[in-house]
Amino acid sequence: MAPLLTAQKAYATKPDAKGKGKGKRKADDIDVDDDNVQQPKQKRNKQRVLLLSSRGITHRMRHLMNDLETLLPHVKKDSKLDSKSQLHLLPEIADLNNCNNTLYFEARRHEDLYMWATKTPNGPSIKLHVQNVHTMDELKMTGNCLKGSRGILSFDKAFDETEWGKLTKEVFTHIFGVPPLARKAKPFIDHVLTFSILDNKIWFRNFQIMEKDPLQPNGPPQTSLVEIGPRFVLTPIRIFEGAFGGATVYSNPEFVTPASVRSAIRHARGDKYRQRKEAQEETSKRKVLRKRNEDALAVSKVFA
């Protein structure tokens, strides 16, 4: 048996008619061209976003979350967080779901909505107040886009003028930018997500890219934008160094809590009531001062 194996090995290494062996060539015999050198592997964009909310959200807030889940195919939705004081658990939940970004919607008093945009597990995190929420079903815009398609992110140039604007732009790029190799993403770009700064507030809009005029389908190509929805306004409150906490990097000095606004409105109503009562008291005092003394020839005294 041993001579047979030796003969087979010798036949495998024997060069053929062309002078090349049938076995594996050595590394020294392989001609390596400069053009065929393996290029370094490009870094893959692996952004995944965890989307969840607290207890006590209203139907409008829930519909807004559903709209964001529809717009962002790389979002993974989770169940509601029971306690609002245990935000330190969110990085662990994001790690369990294999997510490196978190969008957490916190409802207060069933009417105030706050949004946390966070890079987990090391931060930073941005806390924003959400106002003027209008969902897709409510707006009934004529725009439309493919579900799961990727969108272009458009940021106002005012983001580059401030430090907190640059940081917010970077975090929003990671969260709202759909990776090209996301599992549910489709290889189409047919809408634009715009972020604009006005009055120190961030205005969010979603537009469809129309390449033809719907009134002239056979006419020349003409690019236009048609709003789809949803739309909302974000007021930055605070930027923290860590995930859902840590040192304060930025604090908005112009922000007033909605509870303070409602309290001021109630005090204004109370001032009106107090002013009305004071006016009534002054009127009654003037009536008493203007009352004349009874005359000696009065009817009640003459015919007494």
Image (cartoon, rainbow, N blue to C red):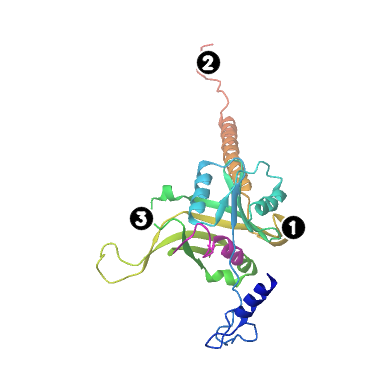
State the separation of the CA atoms marked 3 and 1.
Answer: 44 Å
Residue at screen point 54% across, 64% down: 179
Number of residues whose C-alpha sits closer than 10 Å to that of mark 3, classed few (under 14), some (14–19) or many (20 or more): few
- Magenta includes 31? no
| Element under disc 3 | loop
Counting from the top left corner in percent of width and height, residue 290 is at 56, 32
* Residue pointed to by mark 2: 300
Residues marked 2 and 3 touching at CB (< 8 Å): no
Is 11 or 171 nearer to us in this picture?
11
Residues marked 3 and 1 touching at CB (< 8 Å): no
Whether residue 245 sits left or right of residue 284 in the image: it is right
| Element under disc 2 | helix
- Report which quarter residue 25 is drawn in: bottom right
Residue 246 marker: 1
Q: Amino acid at mark 3?
A: Thr
Number of residues whose C-alpha sits closer than 10 Å to that of mark 2, classed few (under 14), some (14–19) or many (20 or more): few
